[in-house]
Image (spheres, rainbow, N blue to C red):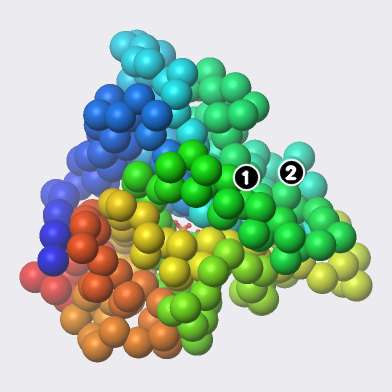
């Protein structure tokens, strides 16, 4: 397995940022999947800073989000759409067509899911998928127990995240939220995967992901089977695998 362990958080963020920039420099029409959360926020900002100082060609790039919360407006600052736009997409001066995100509202989510993966396919498929890791081993919004054969779908929201979003958006309890997410099959079809994970609170799940048998109970364990996945960790997250 391809495991990189950085000595500091700064090194972690910078290295992750350069992995994405390298993918853009290597392939003008690259398709890159991004992930939101605390792990990736700073690396997105570093990419933006590097671009502002030394602009590179982004005219053929497609960026997309691996997941999104449904039935919450994109205007909400905690939506994956807003986070990616604010941290990275605007800074890279991408056009509307170059930034794909799942639609949070639909009368037919099944159709939206198929359309989302079809669009990625039309653009040549995923060249690089960046993934964060949940403390329960989730990938995107694929929670423990998700079949490895899953394709883009709406998962049941993690209750802790759902109650935080409800609090922050004042949404009524009868408005059921969901997790629009690429399925495990879509993720595994990416040509290259960069799993990013830092901090001591992730050390135990990192151990399970890398050293325990591959199981649907730990969705991220499936990455052991991917032919080109780099696991980028800081020393705290790598505590039990050294
Ligand atoms: C959310 C996202 C996931 C992401 C995870 C990591 O659950 N839906 O795609 O991997 O957060 O979050 P953090 O980096 O804040 O630990």
Left or right: 68 with respect to 74?
Answer: left
Which label is found at residue 74? 2
Neighbour tally class for label 1: few under 14, some 14-19, many 20 plus, Cα within 10 Å:
some
| Residue at point 40%, 29% (across, down) | 29
Residue 126's place in the image compared with 241, above or below, is above
Q: Residue at x 86, y 60 (%)?
A: 107
Find residue 114 and report its image quarter: bottom right
129 is higher (above) or lower (below) than 92: below
Q: Is residue 83 visible?
A: no
The CB of the residue at mark 1 lies under 8 Å from ligand 1: no
Residue of label 1: 101
Q: Secondary structure at mark 1?
A: loop
Q: Residue furthest left?
A: 242
Residue 219 rendering spot, x and y as whole percentages: 41, 77
- Location of residue 161 by image quarter: bottom right
Residue 231 image point, x, y percent: 23, 59
Q: Secondary structure at mark 2?
A: loop
Left or right: residue 189 compared with residue 102: left
Q: Where residue 230 sits: x, y (%)?
A: 21, 56
Q: Of tags 1 and 2, which is closer to the observer?
A: 1
User: How many residues crowd mark 2 within 10 Å: few (<14), some (14–19), many (20+)?
Assistant: some
Tell me whether the residue at label 1 lies in contact with that at label 2, contact meaning CB atoms closer than 8 angstroms: yes
**Mark 2 vs ligand 1: CB below 8 Å:** no
């Amino acid at each position: 397995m391809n495991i990189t362990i950085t000595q500091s958080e700064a090194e972690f963020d910078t290295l992750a940022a350069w992995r994405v920039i390298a993918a853009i420099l290597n392939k003008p029409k690259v398709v890159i999947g991004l992930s939101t959360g605390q792990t990736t926020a700073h690396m997105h900002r570093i990419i933006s800073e590097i671009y502002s100082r030394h602009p590179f060609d982004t005219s053929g790039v497609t960026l997309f989000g691996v997941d999104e919360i449904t039935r919450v407006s994109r205007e909400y600052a905690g939506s994956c759409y807003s986070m990616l736009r604010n941290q990275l997409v605007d800074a890279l001066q991408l056009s509307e067509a170059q930034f794909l995100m799942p639609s949070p509202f639909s009368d037919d989510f099944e159709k939206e899911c198929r359309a989302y993966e079809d669009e990625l396919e039309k653009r040549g498929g995923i060249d690089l998928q960046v993934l964060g890791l949940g403390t329960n081993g989730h990938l995107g919004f694929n929670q423990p127990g998700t079949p490895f054969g899953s394709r883009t779908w709406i998962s049941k929201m993690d209750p802790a995240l759902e109650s935080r979003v409800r609090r922050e958006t004042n949404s009524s309890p009868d408005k059921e939220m969901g997790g629009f997410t690429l399925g495990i099959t879509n993720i595994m079809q990416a040509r290259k995967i960069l799993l990013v994970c830092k901090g001591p609170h992730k050390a135990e799940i990192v151990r399970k992901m890398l050293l325990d048998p591959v199981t649907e109970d730990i969705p991220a364990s499936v990455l052991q089977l991917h032919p080109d996945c780099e696991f980028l960790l800081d020393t705290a997250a790598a505590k039990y695998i050294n």
